[in-house]
Amino acid sequence: MKLKINREIENKFYIGFFLFIGLCFAVFFTSRLWMYDDNPIMQTPYNMEITGLDQTNLVLQKWEYNPNEQLMEVMLKTKHVGTDQVRPTFSFAAKEKDSKEIFPVKVVYKDEETVVLQIKKVPETYSYIGLFVRENRDPKIIENEINNALPEGTGTLDPDAAQAKSSWPKPKETIVIGDYRKIKLNKELKSNSTLAYKKEQIMLEIEQVKKEIVTIQNERIPLQEQLISSIKEEIKTLKSEMKYKTEEEKQEAYTKIVSQQEAIKKAEKQQQDYLTEVKQLQEKEAKLYEKLNDVESKAAAANDKKEIESAIKPTKNEVENGGFEEEIELK
């Protein structure tokens, strides 16, 4: 009887011990979900131009992470702002802050304005990821710039000479930083088709245009209206008190009124400029929707083609039988 009681106590002890260990693991691996992180946010801002390269400004449009696949996807917009006739190419590398480990980076989509990258093998415990972007300018353009900078009579650099190449300027680099608190969690993230990435890029651009329109209509234009109304009230007050002023004070009031009237004109012009900008953005939005419809049509056509190919492709049984089970007579 005593042995049975001891065994029950021992079993309860082991059960409690393993429950405690399991709870500790759960707390450790989910602590980022419920514990407050007071470290400064280091995220590169979305939808703002990133400088640092020679010929290109970058815009971070999207950064997502799939913890199940340890996969990140980053969408960058590239704006050619330099004078090179040939657009530069780019090299990419990714690593975590304070770590020597380099994560594999693959370009899964690219066009003239957009690059989509996937960063693989990123552990769920990451905090900050640095995406290093190197701008590779055309060697002939660099060589021409160097030759033009040489003093007259010194000839030109031999592009094949090792010494000449070693003196060339190093490619410019910039870092795009992802903070786990600002990177979107997407457990459905996976590689997509070219048309799917194109569609996503257009939809993101449409969303950004819509936000800009709302900001102008709901914030910037009303602010100018409020400013105009405030200035008009001030002018009205100055005029109503004019009869109580001395000649010198009247002159000062007149000068101030003229200045305020100029301020109203300036605010009205700014208001008109905003209205023009809204109209241009609306036109851009319409063109983007037109572009989106074209991409969706191409995607639908591609899907239809796959379905047709799948429908007419012989099955395994048909292949083994040497053809279709039914004979088709051409008439």
Image: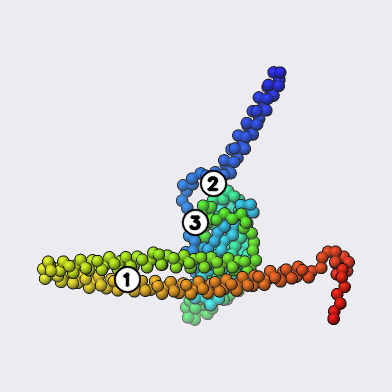
Closer mark to the observer between disc 2 and disc 3: 2
Question: What residue do we see at 23% from left, 66% from top?
Answer: 234
Residue of label 1: 267
Task: Answer above or below: position of 329 versus 232.
Answer: below
Decide which of 232, 135 is in the foreground and name it. 232
> Residue type at mark 1?
Ala
Q: In the image, residue 327 lies at what x, y percent?
A: 87, 73
Q: Which label's residue is closer to the chain start, 2 or 3?
A: 2
**Picture quadrant of residue 17:** top right
Residue of label 2: 33
Quadrant including the N terminus: top right
Closer mark to the observer between disc 1 and disc 3: 1
**Which dot marks residue 299?**
none
Mark 2 and mark 3: span between their CA atoms?
A: 18 Å
Decide which of 35, 235 is in the foreground and name it. 235
Task: Answer above or below: position of 307 versus 129.
Answer: below
Q: In the image, residue 135 lies at what x, y percent?
A: 54, 67
Q: In the image, residue 206 lies at what x, y percent?
A: 52, 68
Mark 1 Cα shell of 10 Å, populated few (<14), some (14-19), many (≥20): some
Q: How many marks?
A: 3
Furthest-front residue in view? 331
Mark 1 and mark 3: span between their CA atoms?
A: 35 Å
Left or right: 254 with respect to 121? left
**Picture quadrant of residue 269:** bottom left
| Callout 3 secondary element | loop
